[in-house]
Image (cartoon, helix red, strand yellow):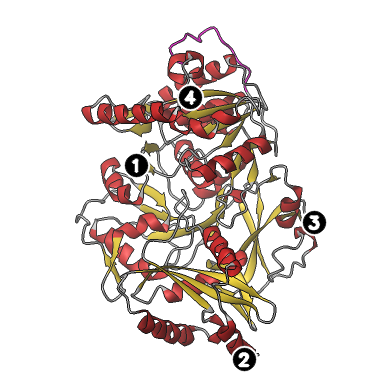
Amino acid sequence: MGNYFKTQYDYMLEKNKNHMNETALSFGDRKITYEELHDKVDKYARLLYKRGIREGDRIGLSTYNTPEGVYLLYALKILGAIDIGFNPLEQSKSSRIITKKDLENTRPKMVITVDRNFSNFKNWEKALDFSTILFSPFESAPNTPETRKFKALYNTDLLLKGNFKLSGKNNLGSLLKEDYSDVTYPRGRFVKDAVGDIMFTGGSTGNHKGVDLAEQSFNAVVEGMNSLYHAEPGMIHLGNIPFCSMAFGRSILHFALCNNMEYALTLKAMPSDFIPELIRTHANAAVGGPVHWITFAEETSDGKYVRSSQLKEGSLTELHYATSGGEARKLITVDAINDGLRYCGSDAVYSDALGSTETSAAIIANNGKEHHKNTIGKPLSTVGIRVIKPCDEKAIASEIPKEDVKPGEDGELIAYGDTIMLGYHNNKEETDRVLYYDENGNRCLRMLDIVRQDEYGEYEYVGRTKRIFVSGCDNIYSEKLEETLMTIPEIKEVVVTPISDAMVQHVPRYHISLANPDTDIKELEKKIETVVLANHNINWLPGSIVYYDKPLERMSNSKINIGYYKEKDAKDLEDGKIDISKAKELRLKAI
């Protein structure tokens, strides 16, 4: 195992020193060697140093997956600055409100942002005392007729929305034309457990928080992933997951570059682009959420999943790793997706990983090779875990009893090691709820996930403690209930939320996206009752069902926005639209 107690830049440089002629990044038809990558990082570091960025400065970064984004990120790392990852895809009014709160909380000295996202920052620049540098995602784009046409439309949109600055000193393209050969800078020093990155949780439960990650965290992820995945110089990894604002994407970028792989950057990150980009880039490895991998399958009229009829036989013979993350896979889709991969000529097996922003991404992973199909695999070598009896989610982490469960029993996951966050930024209350130090000095995190260890020493995912609630005298595992409901052909998607009640604690509410808007609801509800009772009991039956003729709401990271449906529940309760009296009566009889 290598020494990962270095700055992220120095760790990468050490790994790259004998591979400078190999391809580090590709972007369209452009190939960028490791030597060119490091030359660019050096130039960007000189530019940023001249603009006043120093060791320890907090710098906001909002970029798409382009070469400039990679250069900027590692230039900040070489200077010893702390990068704050802002999501460049969020353009809504609500996202601007969240961005303002994040700016107030983290107080960056400067924000470097893709120009289209400038609207999220420009109104707060003077009030919060930070400067900005803007850049275009087309800096490295090929000069083709298609690109020129799209660029013209893009620039028109910028003008209409005011996402530009007239001064060249605020434009990265203009700044890069200057000569920085006489600028020297001191390299950032490595300090163990010093903050290196601030990234934000997805906020799917409505609790958006900044996460302080140590400088060695992503290095430790790379070391740990190397214990589970076989990576060789020259392998191609699809770069579709945003690395600026998502720990998942950042860890994959760092893993690829520190293993001398080619990281195939793409601006086409939507699920509909996933398979075409795998084919175009000749990817050997890729990660995505279930929403990406489900494009390998399609649903039949009777609710079963089969491989997609749109797949091209033999089109992915070079793909060897197919990893899912971000949210739990739907088990009913796994066989169809694997059938699709085989049809395309891939020897990859659709596999899973578990992690979070608070752990710098994955801590347990199934590599699709030696691990069993429906597990999340084993821990990374740089991560230690415990599985304890579940405790009150809101309890202080240092005060909860920590009684280990036996293999085969459901328990709450505790993770420790160098990938674990330092804490929530300026939020001691939330930090104390999940973080504590054990008797050996390990920094330990309550993952708030329920898992069980099988007879092979691998782990099975059960659900989130945040999504477990009591109804009558039963623990209701929302994700397990959703998995059951997804076996019903008429249900396209479903989210289960709890409705609070003083007598029975909670009653489930089903938010169902219909596969067909003409579905006979009465017949569907009979089927729901039959299927739920066959797999669970009456406490799992709904107290309320809401039907939708459109897909469920998702966040920019593709996860279903559970917070949105909880807010809808609160509003419907206030308006008297939810009647759980019959459901309560059933539960009271069973108690």
Q: Residues within 10 Å of mark 3 (few under 14, many from 20)?
A: few
Q: How crowded is mark 1: few (under 14 residues within 10 Å), some or many (20 or more)?
A: some
Inter-mark Cα distance, 4 to 3: 48 Å
Inter-mark Cα distance, 1 to 4: 21 Å
Inter-mark Cα distance, 2 to 1: 52 Å
Decide whether residue 179 is among the magenta residues: yes
Q: What residue does disc 3 label?
A: 439
From the top left corner, tell me how far across and down residue 172 is, in percent: 46, 20
Q: What residue does disc 4 label?
A: 134
Q: Which element is circle 3 on?
A: loop
Residue stretch rendered in magenta on the structure: 176-187
Dot 3 or dot 2: first in sequence order is 3
Dot 3 or dot 1: first in sequence order is 1
From the top left corner, tell me how far across and down residue 271 is, in percent: 35, 51
Q: Nearer the viewer, mark 1 or mark 4?
A: 4
Decide whether residue 421 is among the magenta residues: no
From the top left corner, tell me how far across and down residue 501 is, in percent: 66, 76
Q: Is residue 439 left or right of residue 518?
A: right
Task: Name the amino acid, label 2.
Answer: Ala
